[in-house]
Image (tube, rainbow, N blue to C red):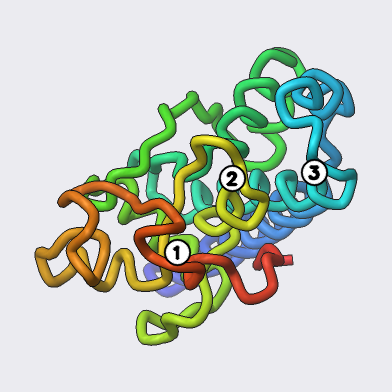
């Protein structure tokens, strides 16, 4: 009798894990292939008239990456480290019913908006950084590349964008400012003049597809 109950429990656990894994795969596919409402680009085109269709596709890729981070965040707060992606997110949320449906199908829960933040000492920013690196398979020692979500503002030359260098988070680990040369204040990101162009991503392609 005890053996039978044990086998039933084991069988139930296997079935549960199978359907959970299948659901996660379906959510992952849905997220990575999701097409955002076209109205988002139309509304933002007046603010960013310089962006091409290809560049808007890159912004959409970065938005997908941010949502992928939430799949692995264990519900912890994740900062939004990009000005342009934050604006895109704002417009997406205004499509209330569509946004709610997306969150449910892609993540199984509603994602509330998190204010954009650039301070590298912030735990939520560093958490986003670590998960974004994992999303693209970037190792901590690979300072030549950056995750798309952190590189896109610089890459697209977004006015008042959040600019990071490839060494930003390595230096902050050493309790220094976010610039190796010390020309930026502690806890801030840097302008391109302060840190050079090392912050642009090597390919500016999203990960996880």
Residue at position x 36%, y 80% from top?
Answer: 140
In the figure, residue 137 lies in which quadrant?
Answer: bottom right
Q: Quadrant of the C terminus?
A: bottom right
Is disc 2 placed on a helix, strand or loop? helix
Residue that numbered label 1 is attached to: 5
Q: Earlier in the sequence, mark 3 or mark 2?
A: 3
User: Whole-Å distance between the Cαs marked 1 and 2?
Assistant: 40 Å
Is disc 3 placed on a helix, strand or loop? helix
Q: Earlier in the sequence, mark 1 or mark 2?
A: 1
Is disc 1 placed on a helix, strand or loop? helix
Q: Nearer the viewer, mark 3 or mark 2?
A: 3
Residue in the foreground of this view, choosing between 192 and 72: 192
Residue at position x 42%, y 81% from top?
Answer: 143
Residue at the outermost left position: 175
Residue that numbered label 3 is attached to: 56
User: Whole-Å distance between the Cαs marked 3 and 1?
Assistant: 56 Å
Residue in the foreground of this view, choosing between 4 and 68: 68
Residue at position x 28%, y 52% from top?
Answer: 120
């Amino acid at each position: 009798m005890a053996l039978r109950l044990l086998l039933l429990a084991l069988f139930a656990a296997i079935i549960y894990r199978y359907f959970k894994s299948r659901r996660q795969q379906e959510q992952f596919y849905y997220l990575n292939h999701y097409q955002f409402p076209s109205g988002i680009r139309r509304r933002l085109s007046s603010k960013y008239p310089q962006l091409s269709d290809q560049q808007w596709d890159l912004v959409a890729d970065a938005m997908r990456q941010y949502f992928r981070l939430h799949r692995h965040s264990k519900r912890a707060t994740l900062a939004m480290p990009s000005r342009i992606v934050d604006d895109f997110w704002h417009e997406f949320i205004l499509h209330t019913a569509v946004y709610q449906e997306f969150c449910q199908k892609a993540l199984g829960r509603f994602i509330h908006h998190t204010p954009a933040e650039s301070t590298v000492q912030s735990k939520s920013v560093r958490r986003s950084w670590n998960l974004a690196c994992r999303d693209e398979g970037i190792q901590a020692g690979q300072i030549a590349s950056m995750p798309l979500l952190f590189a896109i503002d610089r890459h697209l030359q977004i006015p008042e964008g959040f600019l990071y260098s490839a060494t930003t988070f390595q230096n902050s680990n050493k309790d220094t400012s976010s610039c190796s040369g010390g020309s930026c204040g502690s806890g801030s990101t840097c302008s391109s003049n302060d840190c050079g162009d090392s912050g642009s991503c090597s390919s500016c392609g999203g990960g996880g597809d």
